[in-house]
Amino acid sequence: DLGVNFIDTANMYEGYKRFIGSPGGVAEEILGKALKGKRERVVLATKVGMKIGPADDDQGLSRDHILREIDRSLARLDTDYVDLYYMHKPDPSTPLVESIQTFDGLATSGKIRHWGISNFPAAQIAELLKLCDDNGWRRPVALQPAYSLLKRDIEADMLPLCQKEQIAVLPYQVLQGGMLTGKYQRGHEAPADSRQHEKPEWTLPLNDETFAKLDQIEAEARQRGRTLLQHALKSLLEQPAVVSLVMG
């Protein structure tokens, strides 16, 4: 109702109780209920590839796994298509051509409108684009990498590649687990309701190195007349290839 129209999820998301190989699906079910009667108002993205069960075929980017999981995602989301479908991470056990051809087929069938990639290194993105061009397959339109002012490695090669190839970048972890909100202070315990308190393995350690980086970023924010939070978000959006941010 406030104008948010782009919603990102994945088949393996289910909240703080998530673990590697947990079945997922909870977030998609919640969204399916929430978007009832409003589906045409949103751009909806979901993903496939992470481990969602104990069996060998409960992960990866094989044709069989992708076709099974898109149908499961569509059922949970209570829709007959998703606007953007991501390869959630590389799958070294499946030839890249098999994964790309399957995604291209999903677009042809209408189950997805576009596709993207997440957590792929720059060299593999370049390889993937060449395979698409050589075979006449649809290119990925989006990349979802981890990116924040505390994790800037993609600026060296990935962002320039995406800008050159006109791939939209939609980063996640943009506040680095809350580190860039200002809620963590040197010498103080992490707030009881914070990500650091609930899931410390999902955040950076609260050590001198982290706080030194935060001090530098806060100084940059003050120079530009911004709060730390404003600076953390606007700095990413000022990158030419970045079109949106995954919040939350």
Image (cartoon, helix red, strand yellow):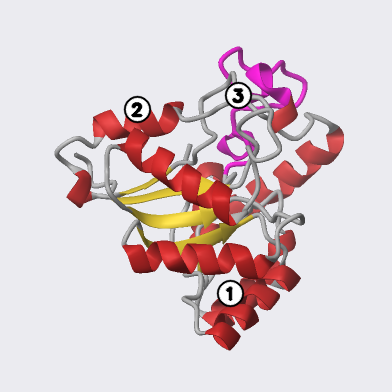
**How many C-alpha atoms fall within 10 Å of the one at disc 2: few (<14), some, or many (≥20)?**
few
**How many C-alpha atoms fall within 10 Å of the one at disc 3: few (<14), some, or many (≥20)?**
few
For the residues labelled 1 and 2, say whether their Cβ atoms are less than 8 Å apart.
Answer: no
Is 149 or 5 nearer to us in this picture? 5
Residue shown at the point (56%, 44%) measured from the top left: 228
Q: Position of residue 103 (x, y in %)?
A: 49, 63
Compute the Cα span from label 3 to label 2.
16 Å
Is 60 or 179 nearer to us in this picture? 60
Q: Would you name the residue on which mark 2 appears?
A: 30
- Magenta residue check for 199: yes
Q: Could you tell me which quadrant the N terminus lies in?
A: top left
Query: Magenta segment, which residues?
Result: 175-200
Query: Residue 18's mark?
Result: 3
Q: Looking at the picture, which amino acid does disc 2 mark?
A: Ile
Establish if 63 lies above or below 163. above
Q: Looking at the picture, which amino acid does disc 3 mark?
A: Arg
Q: Position of residue 82 (x, y in %)?
A: 35, 52
Residue shown at the point (52%, 24%) measured from the top left: 15
Q: Would you name the residue on which mark 1 appears?
A: 162
Helix, strand or loop: magenta stretch: loop
Which image quadrant for residue 192? top right
Q: Position of residue 89 (x, y in %)?
A: 65, 52
Establish if 173 lies above or below 166. above
Residue located farthest toward the front when viewing the structure as drawn:
64
Nearer the N terminus, badge 1 or badge 2? 2
Q: Is residue 21 left or right of residue 78?
A: right
Compute the Cα span from label 1 to label 3.
31 Å
Nearer the N terminus, badge 1 or badge 3? 3
- Magenta residue check for 56: no
For the residues labelled 1 and 3, say whether their Cβ atoms are less than 8 Å apart.
Answer: no
Q: Is residue 29 left or right of residue 51?
A: left
**How many C-alpha atoms fall within 10 Å of the one at disc 1: few (<14), some, or many (≥20)?**
many
